[in-house]
Amino acid sequence: ESTRTRLIKILSAEKDAYISGQALSEALDISRNAVWKHMKELQKDGYEIEGKPRKGYRILSFPNKLSTNTLQWGLHTKWLGRQTIHRDSTPSTQLVAHQAAREMAEHGTVVIADEQTKGRGRMDRSWYSAKEKGIWMSIILRPGIQPHLAPQLTLMSAVALADALRTHTGTTPLIKWPNDLLLSGKKTAGILTEMQAEQDQIQYVVIGIGLNVNHQEADFSGELSDKATSISLETGKTWSVIGLVQDILTSFEQSYEQYMEYGFPTIKERWEEYGFKIGQEVSVRTLKESWKAEFLGISEDGALLLRSPNGETRQMYSAEIDWFDEKGQ
Ligand code: BTX
């Protein structure tokens, strides 16, 4: 750990306490003049620091810029995000997370970036991840579940994210099966689950979450201009990415623990509260056929439940669904 990181940790350990220059110089084993220089550097980076004669220093506020330090300050989780890797810019946080997981990064490690230059979606699609506009992060998990259950983690993540958005921003997202969050019918978040597994054992899972936060209309171009939206566009406010990440992590940790303890049924119930088009008609395409169906919800293990025109209920694990009708509704 750098001296700077240790300095921030000491200063933020007790929120309102002053720490004397002498105490800092001893704890960090540097001169008092060096302590003072570090303070100047921190202030340049946007930390608001108060220095009082005979009392010492304390941090009044952290900068609104993502870093491993600002993420920790005010984070209320037990284990999720206690280890973080932050990049200003990276091709994809998924790649960084896979690499870290192979190098034994611990369960709950979070990789987050201000910008992704090659953000990815499912099936080789791309994910547009503009600098400091949203949350681009990957969570490394080492769950003791069978590999075939991993898709349930995607549904669990979507519910956790929807809960966090509802409480933190007051918006009411809908989840489009299995993994998109919609606001006003437009995509505001996507989830990508990838895993490394042997026959019956998961080595690790990487859950990628992309959330559009502060994009304005001009930030979306081409096909995204009428398909995508952001929290800011929906609420008319600018949001602190840090505060939102922290709440998402808290919600995610709770949902994950609920899932591991009680299994999928409780997640299923919560998922269905947010389910987009439940009870409505959608078009289904498989390799062989194409038909209209009523979307009933999800099954006890997370499959799509559809009622075909002849009244038969069908479970589908993979199918292309046209969720929007010709009018885009
Ligand atoms: P998806 O395949 O369901 O969605 C990808 C599609 O969504 C694209 O083809 C495009 O039409 C649309 N799209 C692309 N970017 C955006 C955007 N910013 N907002 C709304 N719609 C968009 C969804 O894949 C999963 C996305 C996961 C992204 C996270 S970010 C952190 C992590 N790192 C990484 O590379 N991916 C994940």
Image (spheres, rainbow, N blue to C red):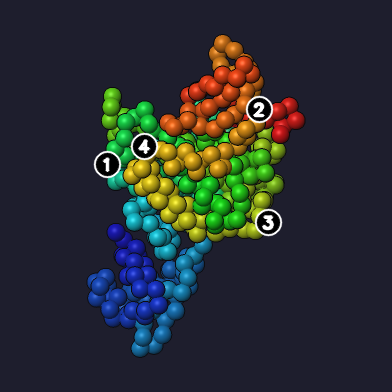
Q: What is the three-letter code of the residue carrying label 1?
A: Met
Comes first in the chain, label 1 or label 4: 1
Q: Residue at x 45, y 52 (%)?
A: 251
- List x then y, in percent, for residue 175: 56, 39
Comes first in the chain, label 4 or label 3: 4
Asked whether mark 2 lies closer than 8 Å to ligand 1, one says no
Quadrant of picture, ligand 1 = top right
Comes first in the chain, label 3 or label 2: 3
- List x then y, in percent, for residue 202: 30, 33
Q: Find disc 2 in the rendering and name its residue.
A: 281
Q: Specify the quadrant of the image occupied by residue 41.
A: bottom left
Contact flag, marks 3 and 2 (Cβ < 8 Å): no
Residue placed farthest to the top in the image? Answer: 288
Q: Find disc 3 in the rendering and name its residue.
A: 236
Q: Is residue 298 left or right of residue 294?
A: left
Q: Specify the quadrant of the image occupied by residue 5.
A: bottom left
Q: CA distance from mark 1 to mark 2?
A: 45 Å
Instruction: Name the quarter where the N terminus is drawn.
Output: bottom left
Asked whether mark 1 lies closer than 8 Å to ligand 1, one says no
Q: What is the three-letter code of the residue carrying label 3?
A: Gly
Q: Find disc 1 in the rendering and name its residue.
A: 104
